Image (tube, rainbow, N blue to C red):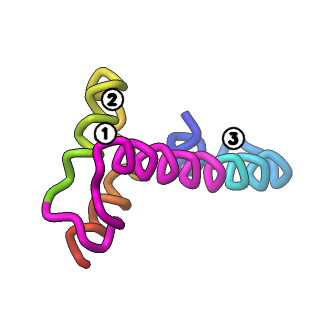
Amino acid sequence: MLEFQINNQDHLSKAEIKTVKANYLEDQKLLLRLIQNKAQEMNYPPMKDWADTKPMAEINTMSGGLMARTEAYQGILGQIIMI
C-alpha cells in the first residue's frame, strides 16, 4: 500500500507524502532486518558473502509470495546480485 501511495501521490497532501515516505523507509529497514534475521537463523554468512538468496526466498514464502512483488524486496535482491 505504501508503495502504491508513493507512486501515486496526486491525491495526497504534502504532510501525507512525508508520512508515507517515512513509513516506507521504516518498512524497508524492517524488511532488511527480517531477511538478515532469517539468514542468521539459516546460518548464512553476512549478506555480502551470500552464494544464493534462499533467506529472501524463505521470507517471500512466508508472505504467500507477495513480498517478491514489492519494490523494496526487489531493491534488496538487486543489491545482493550486484555484490
Specify start and end residues of the magenta stretch as a single range: 24-51
Q: Residue at x 27, y 35 (%)?
A: 58
- Residue positioned 20% across, 46% down in the render: 54
Of marks 1 and 3, the one in the foreground: 1
Which residue type does callout 3 highlight? Answer: His
Q: Is residue 38 magenta?
A: yes
What secondary structure is found at the residue carrying circle 3? helix
When asked about the image quadrant of residue 60, the answer is top left
User: Residue 11 got which mark?
Assistant: 3
Q: Is residue 24 left or right of residue 78?
A: right
Q: Which residue does the numbered mark 1 point to in the structure image? A: 69
Question: Reading the chain from its start, which is encountered first: label 1 or label 3?
Answer: 3
Specify the farthest residue to the right.
15
**Label 1: element kind:** helix
Does residue 43 appear to the left or right of 14 in the view shown?
A: left
Number of other residues with Cα within 10 Å of mark 2, as a class: few under 14, some 14 to 19, many 20 or more = few
Q: Do labels 3 and 2 touch, CB within 8 Å?
A: no
Q: Is residue 25 magenta?
A: yes
Left or right, 73 with respect to 42, comes to right
Q: Residues within 10 Å of mark 1 (few under 14, many from 20)?
A: few
Label count reads: 3
Q: Residue 31 appears at what percent x and percent y?
A: 49, 46
The tag on residue 66 is 2
Tell me the quarter of the picture where residue 47 sits. bottom left
